[in-house]
Image: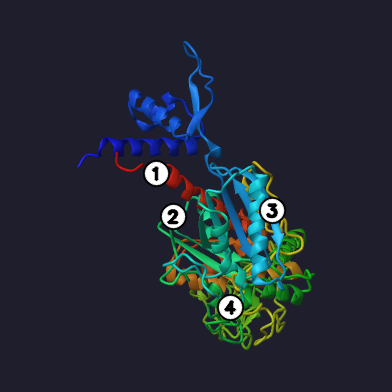
Amino acid sequence: MPASPSTARAINDRLALRLLQQEGPLTAGQLKQLTGLSRPTVADLVERLGTAGLITVVGESGEQRRGPNARLYGIVAGRAHLAALDVRTEGVFVLVSDLLGRVLAEASVPIGGDTGTGPAVEQAVAAVERTAKEAGADRLHTVGIGAPGLIDPATGDLRDSGGLPAWHRNLAAALQERLPGARVTVENETNLAALAEQREGVARDRDTFVLLWLGHGVGAAVVLDGTLRRGASGGTGEIGFLPVPGTGSLPSATDCDGGFHSLAGAAAIGSLAADCGLPVPATMDGPGAAVVVREAVTKAASAAPGDGSATTASGVPSASAVSGGGSAEVVSGVPSASMVSGGGSAEVVPGIPGIPGIPGIPGVPSASAVSGDGSVAAASVVPSVLASAAPGDPSPAAASGARPASAAPGDRSATTGPGAQTARPVSGADAASAVAGTDPASAVSGVAPTQPVSGALPASAVPGDHPAGRFLHLLADRIAVGVASVVAVLDPGCVVLGGEAGQAGGAVLAGLVEERLCRMSPLRTQVRASTLGGSAVLRGALLTARDRAQDELFAPPGPS
């Protein structure tokens, strides 16, 4: 059945508004060309949208033509003001933008752990009101909130979760009460980070991917066929509770201690760094973990030798290190086939089971370990990771019997308490740093933006005999255990290492994880480092608020 005239007008209006949003100011002629509509129809919609206060003349085109230059029409950015909040364990980040997403004002408000629920909510709401006033917004149209914890898919409310501040759950209702007419929505922080990566980050070319958040805690977001998946109870991606080997215990329904969080959360990263002899900040939250990882990448790059004499953290030399008949003795792991090419042999020393830093993981050597003319004798081990200094020395040997620096079995010091797997505190150094009027992705969570170290240090060149290199190898081992479980179930084809620590690790950490993953799983998976890092949550909250506001403002009117 053909659309009614009013419906057709609404569809055309919405199409034109989307084009103006995506392309910027356009002339009527450009709108005609892009929409395929007739000149009279375009003239009608331009007049209609102008009367509604949605578009206005913003200038003139510079086209060479007879008569006056054509008018340029653009969306009225001040037609609505939006707020985005990144709610954390110990504070909140706030920004206010116009309808096009341009940041007008922002603030960072720490909230102490001993602050009562009522005063904490009041501080957060007051921060939103102050920021809106700074931005010149008389009222807020839409507010998007990113918070740790589970979102009830039926009600959209933040569910009660042990270990998270009670004021988190009361904030949305308080904002709705104090901001009459505003639309307030809450979403899990990791889900918002994934939306930001999908729209503006490293996953723009992927319809299916998983974001692994590495910050104060660990979490994951799943995007399948372009759609964010939340699960029956809103708990998709609560990977901190994932049972994994090497933690000495199992998680419970109320405590992620013993789950993947105990291997890859900020406290665990700090403990691993200390074991490797690296300096650790006093506060091991998301920004603290980022400092540790970023400095390790820098030190490993400067320590990478040019003669290939270094071995990896697990004692595995690079494939080319034993080519030409050399032999290699591996303390923990199984060499690949290329290690024994040319007739070399490789022997796995029994009695050192498991991935370095994750004791007691049974397994078998990979098929490639026994291909070619070489032979391999394996104990109960998983295939170790092949990453070493540049080749050149044909006769490296692992430190036989050396114990990798790691937490002992049963050591649960890497946890941070119930429910902490997704909470990220604001450290004393935290400050929202996006410049008003610029891309709000520049607002960072306590750590200066760090671009991935693309190509600066290949995974195979990370020196395992250097404390920083050993730390990166062991951290990659740990991360790969959780990622491999996700890949085996979802086969996403791409995993993004997000959060402050994921961004700080850049291409170096991503490359090490991908290298291990390709040995642990038959499913080909790219591992990429986030370019948004901790700012992804705030950016995702803003994108969500903008989409909702535009959906309402650009929606077809009622029947006429």
Q: Distance between the residues labelled 4 and 2?
A: 34 Å
Q: Mark 4 points at which residue?
A: 162
At 66% across and 75% down in the image, what residue appears?
A: 314
**Viewer-proximal residue among 146 and 205:** 146
Rendered image coloring scheme: rainbow
10 Å crowding of disc 3: few (<14), some (14-19), many (20+): many
* Front position among marks 1 and 4: 1
* Front position among marks 4 and 2: 4
Circle 1/circle 4 CB separation < 8 Å: no
Circle 2/circle 1 CB separation < 8 Å: no
10 Å crowding of disc 2: few (<14), some (14-19), many (20+): some
The quadrant holding residue 283 is bottom right
| Percent x, y of residue 486 | 48, 70
Circle 4/circle 3 CB separation < 8 Å: no
Q: Which of the two labelled residues, at mark 3 and mark 1, occupies the earlier sequence position?
A: 3
Residue 291 vs 376, above or below: the answer is above
At 42% across and 69% down in the image, what residue appears?
A: 231
Q: In this view, does 377 lie to the left or right of 270?
A: left
Q: Which of the two labelled residues, at mark 2 and mark 1, occupies the earlier sequence position?
A: 2
* Three-letter amino acid code of the residue under disc 3: Ala
Label of residue 107 in the image = 3
* Front position among marks 2 and 3: 3
* Three-letter amino acid code of the residue under disc 2: Asp
| Percent x, y of residue 451 | 66, 52
At 70% across and 76% down in the image, what residue appears?
A: 398
Q: In this view, does 344 lie to the left or right of 222?
A: right
Label of residue 555 in the image = 1
Secondary element type, mark 3: strand
Question: Is there any visible trace of residue 354 in the rendered image?
Answer: yes
